[in-house]
Image (cartoon, rainbow, N blue to C red):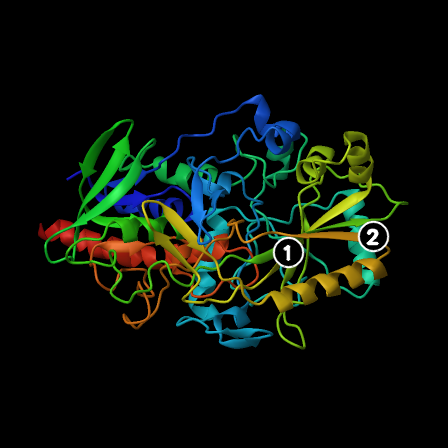
Amino acid sequence: MDADLIIIGSGVGGASLAAALAPSGLRILVLEKGERLLPCPEARDDEAIFLRKHFAPTEEWMGSDGRPFVAGNNYAVGGNTKFYGAVMYRFRASDFAPRQHLEGRSPGWPLDYADLSPWYDAAERLFRVRGTAGEDPTDPPRLSPYPYPPVPDESAIAAVRERLKKAGAKPASLPLAIDIDAWLAEGQTGWDAFPNTGTGKIDAESGPLTDALMHPNVTLRTGSEVIRLETDATGKRITGVVIRRGSGEETLTARGVALAAGAIQSAALLLKSANAAHPNGLANGSDQVGRNFMNHNSSAMLTFDPFRRNTSVYQKTLSLNDFYEGEHGPLGNVQGLGRITAPVLKANMLWLPMPVARLLAAYAFGWFLQSEDLPDPDSRVTWNDGIVIHWQRSNMAAHRRLIRRTRALMRRAGFWLALTKTFGVRVTSHQCGTARLGTDPATSVVTTGLQSHEIGNLWITDASVLPTSAAVNPALTVCALILRAAEGVGKALGAERRTS
C-alpha cells in the first residue's frame, strides 16, 4: 500500500486537507498533475503575462455547441490559487438559506453558517488572512478577529474609499491572503492574475501545503496525472488510483482517496472511471455527478475621472456589498481588481494603440462585479473522450442590475465614465457545484462530511461539493468545509489502519 490517504490535487481543497491531517501520523500522498512554479523574470512582467501569455493554459475543453475552447485551469503545485486574487471571503449567513432571486431560487444548504463559523476562523488562520471585521454591513458574526490587520489602501485608493462613502456607500477592506511587504519586496506589481513564485501571496502551496510538508508522513508527487479510479467488484471501495507519468502508467493504492482536482476535473474523473458497478460514473447513483455546475456571473468595470490619476501599485483592497441583499432580490459583490496596467488593457482590446492604453491606464480604476449563479441540473460537465462543458447561465437579470447600480454609484462618486465587459460562458475561474453535498443520497453525491454516499473510502474535497455559489469568492468556504470534514476522514482511516 502506497499511503493511508491519496489526495488528488494540491489546490485549496487538497492542500487544506493535507495540512489538517498531517499531525495525525497518517501516511499522506498528494498527487499533482503539474510542477512547481519557479521564480523567473516573467512572473512579475505584465507584458509577458497578459500580452505574450507566458503562463496561459493550453488545454482545450469542448463546449456543448461542439466548439473547443482553451480551459481556464492552471496545473501547478497549488493549483489555480497560484494565480488567484487571494480574496478570502466568508459566505454571508444568508447564503446558506433558501432565498428568492430575480430569476430563480437558491435552494440553500443542509448546513448553516453557525456550522462553519469555527472552521472559517481556522481557515483564516491557515491562509494568514488580513481583514477588518465590522466594516461590511453584510459581515456574518465571528468567533475570532482576523489573524492580521487589513492590507492598507494606497493613497489613491484611500481617496476612492472616501469618495464612495460620500456617495452613500459602505466600502470595506477586502479579506486578503497577502503579506504585502513580502509581496512588494519581490516586485512592484499587483498580485491578481500574477503567478506566485515566492511567499508574499499565501496560496495553497505557500500556505497549507508548505505546512503539511513539514511533517515526514506527507509526500508530494508532481507530474502525476490521475487518469482513472478503480474499485473492487462491489463498487464500494476505491482499490487503485491510476496515474500517468511521462509515457507510462502506474497504479497506486491507499486506504482512502480524497478527490480535490477542481469541480470540472473531479467530475470528469468520476465520469470517465465508470465500471460495471458504476455504469454512469463513480459515486453517481444519484445522477448528480457533473450536474449543477456553477460559475459566477462576472464583469470587469473600469471607472475614469480625468482629474484623478491612479498612482496605485496593487489597488486590490476595497470591496462593496451594498447590493448583496438588494431590496428587489440579492444582486452581488463588487471588489477592486488588481491594478489595470497598459498591457492588461491592450490584451483585452488588441486594436488599442499602446500609447492610448498607457493614457487610459493612468486614470483607470478597476472593479470586479460578481453575482450568484443558481444551480441547474442541466448545467453540467460531461465526458466524451474529453471534457465537455454545458454551462446554463442563470440569474443574469440580477447581474445586469448590479452593473447599473454600481455604475450609478460610481458616477455619484465622481467617476465620469464607466466601461464594462461581461465575461463569457467559457471563463471558469470560480467553478463549483458538480458533486454537491447533502443528506439525501438520491439528490447529492457526498455527505456533509464530504464522504461519498456510495463509496466508503472516497471523499471529495474541493468546490465540487458546494450546493450554491453565493456571490463571493469560494476559496475560504472550500477550506472551511475541508477542515470541518478532516476529523472524520482521519478517524475513518485511523480506525481502518488499526484493524488491518
Disc 1 residue type (three-letter): Thr
Q: Report the side of 89 relative to 259 (left or right).
A: right
Residue that protrudes farthest toward the front in the picture? 66
Residue at the far top: name it: 41
Residue 239 shows which numbered tag? Answer: none
Asked which secondary structure carries label 2, the reply is strand
> Which residue has dot 1 on it?
132
On screen, residue 331 versus residue 290, left or right, reads right
Q: Nearer the viewer, mark 2 or mark 1?
A: 2
Q: Is residue 481 visible in the rendered structure shown here?
A: yes
The answer to which quarter of the image holds residue 101 is bottom right
Which residue does the numbered mark 2 point to in the structure image? 417
Residue at position x 80%, y 41% in the image: 310
Considering depth in this image, is 477 or 488 the residue closer to the camera? 477
Q: Is residue 411 above or below residue 191?
A: below
> Which element carries disc 1, helix, strand or loop?
loop
Q: Position of residue 398 (x, y in %)?
A: 63, 68
At a point 54% along the width and 39% down the height, the residue shown is: 83
Gap between marks 2 and 1 measured at Cα: 30 Å
Q: Amino acid at mark 2?
A: Leu
